[in-house]
Amino acid sequence: MKKPALFALFFALSSIAIAQKKTDRPNIVFIMADDLGYGDLGAYGQQIIETKHLDALAKEGMRFDNFYAGTSVCAPSRSALMTGQHTGHTPVRGNKELEPEGQQPLADSVQTIAMLLQKAGYATGAFGKWGLGMVDTYGSPRNKGFDEFYGYNCQRQSHRYYPTHLWHNQERIELEGNGLLAKGQYAPELIQEKALEFIDNNKDKPFFLYVPTVLPHAELSGPDDQYYEQYANKFEEKAHKGNDYGPKATIPGYASVAKPRATYASMVSRMDAQVGQIVAKLKDLNLLDNTIIVFTSDNGAHREGGADPDFFNSSAGLRGYKRDLYEGGVKTPFIVYWQGKVAPGTTSNYLGAFWDVLPTLAEVAKAGKPQYTDGLSFVPTLLGKPKKQKQHDYLYWEFHEDGGRQAVRQGDWKLILQKVRSGNPVAELYNLKLDPKEQNNLATSNVKKVEELREIIAKAHVETRDFPLVSK
């Protein structure tokens, strides 16, 4: 055999070996929206906002219909995701603000999914909103397993889309315009550029790309570009006609109703387009067939800044919003794309939550077992082997504002305790199979079930000094 032929054969065999090795350890892209409602995607019934890229991922992957966030507000939900622990155990259980910038940090002893993957040889990057510890704390992204971070370290700062600064690892990046919308730099675009660069820079090794985007969190703000104009023109036309898209007959009222609606819709579509850009980048680099992509939201739809979740049916008919422990506050869209592994166009009723993500991705990446987790790996569900899937005995949430709330779901039953700090909480009991919108409180007619579920709540919650809930 001639040398060129031998070289070609050697190259072909080497390529096959490399491909087999790559397939054994897929890249992981985890994208998390901020305050996106369960019903804000077309794949989950949205009728007004266009989300074609995420709808395509759902069509080509698996849509979960029974998946839950860590809780109904930002920092503790993210803590549950990163640590694989529900809010009765996870270290950060509320949006505890620190001055001059930042929130209560994760402790030095806390293990995160990024730390597991980093130790297993993955390049790790986070681009978006962190909120679990400033750059000079144990909870900074760099100390919690991320090789690179770019974005808002402090979630309070992320309330502004034209901020004064962002953070790149330990470096504060000053932005033009001093936070003024008219002259400033639109942070989601800057963050997206860095996320795409991360893929380029790590295309030859397994990587974990975490994209906790700030869209569509309030404030309602963004450039007057094609994403905004498609809705502004539509809603303005509807406003003229006097239907539900805006105030009747007069355009002066348009700014107070239809403009915020157009802005919110454009923010969701912009986020969807950025997901499409990430998918396109993976495809261009021939990485898409060896990448698992996960999309979700950190909690339910918000009502701040003029947002109108009822108009968009953002909770898909479920009761509640952000900060509630009703279904609309904690149930989240959850989509997984994994070519060759997840069957296209499938749906799952697996009852899962954010604390399942850590053991699942650790298994996918062959990263070993975590130190501790409340979660279960749902890899069997992804691979179409439901009979091998372990099931939760219960799911548990807590929320520390508004007098304190706790909730547990076991099977079809869900118990919510309101005003927990009062020492005499108000119980609400729902059968979600018969009453998915939580309209019929059965607490007084089924006292036995209330007591059973209260025992689970007492077992699930471990009091902590940093975030006390039930102690005096």
Image (spheres, rainbow, N blue to C red):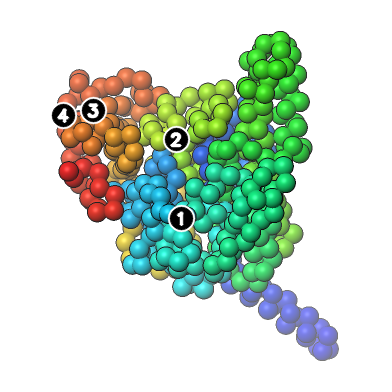
Quick one: label 2, few (<14), some, or many (20+) residues within 10 Å?
A: many
For the residues carrying marks 3 and 4, which lies nearer the camera in this image? 3
Report the residue marked by disc 1: 100
Q: Of helix, strand and loop, which one carries label 3? A: strand
Asked if residue 358 can be seen in this view, the reply is no
Q: Which secondary structure, mark 4?
A: helix
* Residue with the mark numbered 2: 322
**Which of the two discs, 2 and 4, labels the residue nearer the N terminus?**
2
Q: Nearer the viewer, mark 2 or mark 4?
A: 2
Label 1, residues with CA under 10 Å away: few <14, some 14-19, many ≥20: few
Q: Residue at x 47, y 36 (%)?
A: 300
Is the C-beta separation of discs 2 and 4 under 8 Å?
Answer: no
Q: Are marks 1 and 3 in contact (CB under 8 Å)?
A: no
Residue under pointer 3:
426
> Would residue 364 be found to the left or right of residue 472 on screen?
right
Distance, label 1 to label 3, CA atoms, is 37 Å
Provide residue 385's location: percent of width, then percent of height.
45, 50
Task: Say whether disc 3 or disc 4 marks the residue closer to the N-terminus.
Answer: 3
Q: Nearer the viewer, mark 1 or mark 3?
A: 1
